[in-house]
Amino acid sequence: MIRIAIADDHPIVREGLRRIASAGVGISVTGEASTAAELFRLLGQAPVDVVLLDVSMPGSTLVETLKELRGRYPSIKVLVLSVHPEDQWAVRALRAGAAGYLTKDHSPEQLVEAIRRVARGGKYVSEMLAERLAGLVDQGGPRAPHEGLSDREFEVLRALGSGMAVKDVAEELHLSAKTISTYRARLLEKMGLKSRADLVRYVVEHDLLK
């Protein structure tokens, strides 16, 4: 029996995922969580084989949650589910320890297949993402400037690019305003941009807010 935990902050989404997963033969839902803190409490109470993890969980960033999961529960496989295009978060999620990445527009059958594959110790990515990963290997590195950023730099880029003030970004990411200002200057330098307006324009043009 494959025991799974569902981590998503939307009750309707959790209900849908629970029904789809439970319909699969040999799969049972151990519990559900709406925040990162709830997820770790759940994992401390019941055995879990696979976590279905939403990209945007309150209380922690995706990469932070994945790294903590890998450190505290290395045997648990994580399948990341997202509404975000694969070119934004998939590679970062896999690097941080996810066993698979699936956008929420895939079919219920594909979700069940992904659960089974990662539970067996395999990796699950779409054909499109597999081709993209192969392309990155062939090119020897990232193609767009934002793909060369660290995970934290990428988070700050998206936040600043959405129009958030420095103090609001600092509060959301649990950092100081001075640190965010330092990140902003670093982003401008690394990406060859000149102003905050350039950052916003870049984020919009590359659809990084989806």
Image (cartoon, helix red, strand yellow):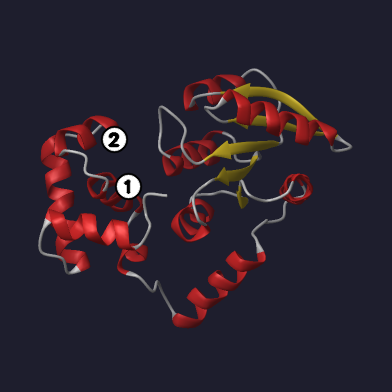
Q: Is residue 169 left or right of residue 207?
A: left
Crowding at dot 2, Cα within 10 Å, few <14 / some 14-19 / many 20+, comes out as some
In the rendered image, the quadrant that contains the N terminus is top right
Q: Give residue 67's position: percent from left, percent from top.
A: 47, 42
Q: Give residue 206's position: percent from left, percent from top.
A: 35, 62
Q: Nearer the viewer, residue 73 or 171?
A: 171
Crowding at dot 1, Cα within 10 Å, few <14 / some 14-19 / many 20+, comes out as some
Residue beneath label 1, please? 155
**155 versus 134 height, above or below:** above
**61 versus 19 height, above or below:** below
Name, please, the residue furthest toward the bottom: 138
Residue beneath label 2, please? 173
Residue pictured at 79% horizontal, 48% vertical = 109
Residue pictured at 49% horizontal, 59% vertical = 91
The answer to whether the residue labelled 2 contacts the one labelled 1, judged by CB atoms less than 8 Å apart, is yes
Q: Give residue 195's position: percent from left, percent from top.
A: 10, 59
Q: Nearer the viewer, residue 165 or 49?
A: 165
- Type of residue at label 2? Leu
Determine whether the residue tagged by mark 2 lies in a helix, strand or loop: helix
- Type of residue at label 1? Glu
Query: Which of the 4 image quarters holds residue 8?
Result: top right
Q: Is residue 78 left or right of residue 122?
A: left
